[in-house]
Amino acid sequence: QTHLHFIRYIFQSDLHDMTDKEPHSSDNHANAASSSKACSNDESSSSSIWNNLTSWVQKKHGGHVHEALHLETTNESNRGVIASRPIDHGELLIRLPSSCILSGRILLQKPDYEKSLQQKSSWMQCVASYYLALSTIENSDNKWKPYLDSLPKTYETLFQWSNEEVKTYLRGTTLGAMILTDRTEDSMKTRYQTAVRPVLDELKLLVGGEQAKSSEDDDEMKTFLDACMCISTRGFHYSGDTTGTAAGHDDESSYKGPFLLPIIDLLNHNPSKSCTTLQYSEGCFSMVAERPIAQGEEIFHSYGDSMTSAQLLQTFGFVMVGATTPPGEKATTTNSKKSSRCLTPASLSKSKHLIAACQAIKQSGIPKRLQSKLALKAQQGGGGTTIVDAEEEEESWQVVDLPVRDEDGILSDDILIDCNNHHQDGDTNSNQEDDDDYNNKGLTDELITWMCLQFLPSEAYEEMCEQDGKVSALLDATILQDLYLGILVCRSLLLALNKKLDDYFYYREQEETNAKKEESPASSCLCETTDSVVDRLEALLAQPVPSPKNINNNNSSQRAQYGWTVRNEELSNLKVWAIQVSCIMKCLYEELKGGEQQHSNGTEEEPNAKRAKVEAE
């Protein structure tokens, strides 16, 4: 869940392929925990829940809960686990035997369920175990009642957001678009009916027993959504060996989560104040104090050390507002590994943004002006790198006539722009030269290759593509050092970004009014400077949190802050990308102009040195 290949709407990644088991990997020891944010129980209720739960864990299952720990209502009516006295470094806080843990593993150990679940995803296996626990209540078996009583009665996740809140607070974001698409297609209900319900029915785990006859039953769908939200907000994934002293069953040893862990799933998330992490040993999950804990201090741990705001919101329903470390800066706390967090990637539409931008550049006067300048540069002996000889360009390379080239399937319909530096946690020896390389921060080989194909002359295009239309090899960012091709690609990328920015404005009317005072959007986008794109990014980042107009519920202000944080993370990510593309393009224009100062000194700067100089400016 913490991988950044693509941000994913809550539970949807598991629902897409739940019929087949998929391997799970994690960068953290524990990946995903509970958010107690959704609960609002008074002190007496919290005390009763805690006493029943700890007694159940310790007396019935032989577990351990530190005597100084207790559950209480913290600020804003949220629950948290508090230390009633000082706890020393190294003291055992919680130990849970496997008998009190809900997971797909308990069903894989039962012959009646193993055959049906063996080839299902670990998520589906955990859903089935959740339904098994619910069925014990229906059958007057109180085996899981203390744990089920500790779960929130209501949840605060993206499912609780109205369509108007999604459109307003997540305006322009990839996450917002995914949510609205799923709701329009009613994806959750469809997937439940086609992929989840048949499995539960086969296992005789549908809540309501013989009365659960229809998949259209609202109560039945609500139970499923509660199961989804419970597993998403409270499920742990563990990347280490979880076989312990078990018999080494293949399915059991390969199961890495989700695990529903009583007591532990009541701990809240705060990476900068974390005092413990999840461990597994000898068949038990445990947590140990990793530093001294003061009296009255809340016990925090981390749900994921480098999760983006979008990942936190889609998985747990909340965002750590103001906790993001800007790109290029290091965390300032003493524990930088736990305090830094990645920026949310942003997506560009291939058709709406990239193709439209390339076509606009082809139809503009930019290609012809570039050809004229390159021809003049060649006549003056200025050199310069181009794919086609400057004297032949005007005849053989008319990009205005080139079609859209997309038969290769190099890019998906949505292209992720991710400008985070993906060094491994704790890697302090990353090469600084990597940050000066052309091929970093969102300019992937796939994106560069696809963009270049839109402008390559027919001969070069045919050389690159095999008879079946597949590209024989991907191009890397060094191809952008070609003056003609590099400038056309960079101009197109910045124009595509400018089109993308239209989606983010909270108050579109205000932006359009301001635009009328300047030159027309088309001429602004196609000019040979990039200040307009950066200025628009700055204007977007400066927009305040939107007021929840016409939205009437108690959580709107907080949801607005969460959405604003996700949106601004995407914009910050795009700003890094825009600066990178701008630097490459400015270096190319400097070379195109002849680099008078370098020629007068009899020297020529290397392209990377030029780019570093421009980036510094």
Image (cartoon, rainbow, N blue to C red):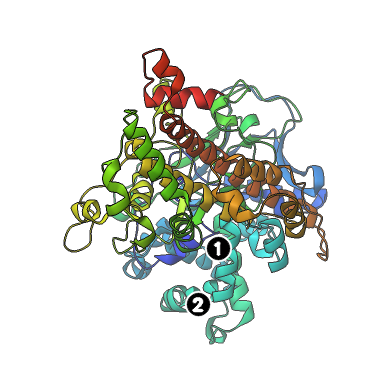
In this figure, which residue is indicated by the disc labeled 2?
A: 190
Give the camera-side residue of 142 and 184.
184
Q: Is residue 513 visible?
A: yes
Q: What kind of element bears circle 2?
A: helix
In the image, what residue occupies the spot 31% across and 28% down? 381
Q: What kind of element bears circle 1?
A: helix
Residue at the farthest top position = 601
In this figure, which residue is indicated by the disc labeled 1?
A: 178
Q: Earlier in the sequence, mark 2 or mark 1?
A: 1
Q: Are marks 2 and 1 in contact (CB under 8 Å)?
A: no
Q: Is residue 411 visible?
A: no
Give the camera-side residue of 33 and 328.
328
In the image, what residue occupies the spot 18% across and 64% down? 468
Residue 359 in the image: state x and y as whole percent. Answer: 45, 60
The amino acid type found where label 1 is placed reads Met
What is the spatial separation of the Cα atoms under label 2 and label 1, in whole angstroms?
16 Å
Residue 568, placed above or below residue 88: below
In the image, what residue occupies the spot 76% across and 43% down? 72
Residue 585, placed above or below residue 15: above
Does 2 sit left or right of 431 as displayed?
A: right
User: Which quarter of the picture shows residue 188?
Assistant: bottom right
The amino acid type found where label 2 is placed reads Thr
Residue 459 in the image: state x and y as whole percent. Answer: 21, 54
Residue at the farthest left position = 467
Q: Give the crowd class for mark 1: few <14, some 14-19, many >=20 residues within 10 Å.
A: some
Residue 616 in the image: state x and y as whole percent. Answer: 54, 23
Quadrant of the snapshot with the C terminus: top right
* Closer mark to the observer between disc 2 and disc 1: 1
In the image, what residue occupies the spot 42% across and 34% down? 588
Give the camera-side residue of 377 and 523.
377
Residue 313 in the image: state x and y as whole percent. Answer: 62, 51
Q: Give the crowd class for mark 2: few <14, some 14-19, many >=20 residues within 10 Å.
A: few
